[in-house]
Amino acid sequence: MISEKMKKLVKNNSVIREMFEEGKKLEKLYGKENVFDFSLGNPSVPAPKEVNKAILEIIEKEDSMFLHGYMSNSGYEDVRESIANSINKKYQTLFNYKNIIMTVGAASGLNIVLKSIINPRDEVIVFAPYFSEYNNYIQNYDGKVQVVSPNLKNFEPDLEEFEQKINKNTKAVIINTPNNPTGVVYSEDTITNLTNILKKKEKEYNSQIYLISDEPYREIVYDGIKVPYVTKYYNNTIVVYSYSKSLSLPGERIGYVVIPNELSNSEEMIEAVTIANRIIGCVNAPSLMQRLIPYCLDAKVDIETYNKNRNLLYEIITKNKFECIKPQGAFYLFVKSPIDNEKEFCEIAKKHNLLFVPASSFGCPGYVRIAYCVPYEMIQKSEEAFKKLAKEIYK
Ligand code: PLP
């Protein structure tokens, strides 16, 4: 018999599973080319050519006993050093290998950080709309999720409500910019104001409140927009990075965590996060993928492909009188449901073979997420379906 805790998780999972199965069902009925599945956040741009080239070179060059062996739970020192140097060059920081811990993607990065800091009933603040897995990750360690309501004006965080929600039990805050599901990049002003609030509250409660910056979409940005490097604004920041999107390697599971020296009790935290990597069962990040990173420090996927998708889909959506802000990053459009119940809207869209994710699953009912990490031709072909959907909705 599975545990009571797991029973609940299995039940909650069924929304996503249902949608996946629904898509498959529609494909069988109408043919794959006539179904417009905008529900998944799976990168649609291939990994840059440097990736496969480097893998072949590494396999040729390196001793396979070493290549496939265990290493320190925090990863290879030379790989970590090369990442630290690359961040220093890009953002004028002062990291070295000790500040970098290799992880099994951002998902495990978040888990090992949360495992290292949460005592039962500690609170972690998230800003709606947010990546719903945060609920699971926080509850894995018996933490409590505190949600700040969405700011429907521009989807930057509501800092007034944020300040009110901080209390003596607040252990951490998670931000995600560029954001899944809105595509919004928090401005430098927002980061400055948010971190000023945290500094004030740390003083008030004589506590440490960790700012966890979840950054799988850092490189996926448009129109030259800059994403502030958060460790420069607040000492108790931990960055969680992933190559899942920047190198289109989500199945390979590789990322890292940055713990700056300025973080209070930094050495103790580095040790805890390293040990957490082992004891949550990851042990270490995949060896071949770690060895790959120094070859790909300046490589990234072709952002222009996503940009073209963004522009076309935004045009189709707004031309058909659906309301949405133009995203500055990631690969999602966050669209206001034209009827109150966004789940009902998704059902109507389904009749036109359009699949969206209802945003109540991101803590923001009344909206839907439309992922444009899909082939350009699919977006072109979906235009008719959007027209028909608009006609039915606004008749
Ligand atoms: N955080 C956010 C906001 C995400 O959207 C995702 C994946 O889609 C993750 C974390 C997990 O990423 P990874 O594949 O690196 O574990």
Image: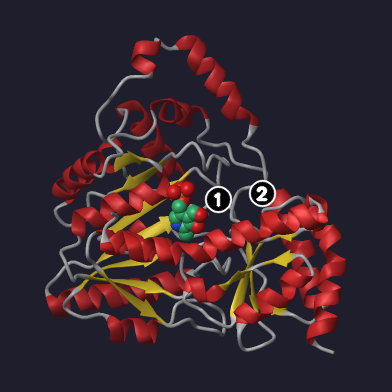
Tell me if the residue at label 2 has its CB under 8 Å from ligand 1: no
> Mark 2 belongs to which amino acid?
Ile
Q: Label 1: which residue? A: 219
Kindly state the secondary structure of the residue where label 2 is placed.
Answer: helix
Q: Position of residue 320 (x, y in %)?
A: 82, 78
Q: Label 2: which residue? A: 303
Is 22 positioned to the left or the right of 11 in the image?
Answer: right
Tag 2 and tag 1, C-beta contact below 8 Å: yes
Q: Quadrant of residue 385?
A: bottom right
Question: Front-most of 299 and 356?
Answer: 356
Residue at x 39%, y 82% (from the top left corner): 159
Is 340 positioned to the left or the right of 310 in the image?
Answer: left
Comes first in the chain, label 2 or label 1: 1
**Label 2 neighbour load within 10 Å: few <14, some 14-19, many 20+:** some
Residue 50 higher or lower than 101, as above or below: above
Residue 287 higher or lower than 128, as above or below: above
Residue at x 13%, y 48% (from the top left corner): 268
Residue at x 37%, y 19% (from the top left corner): 68
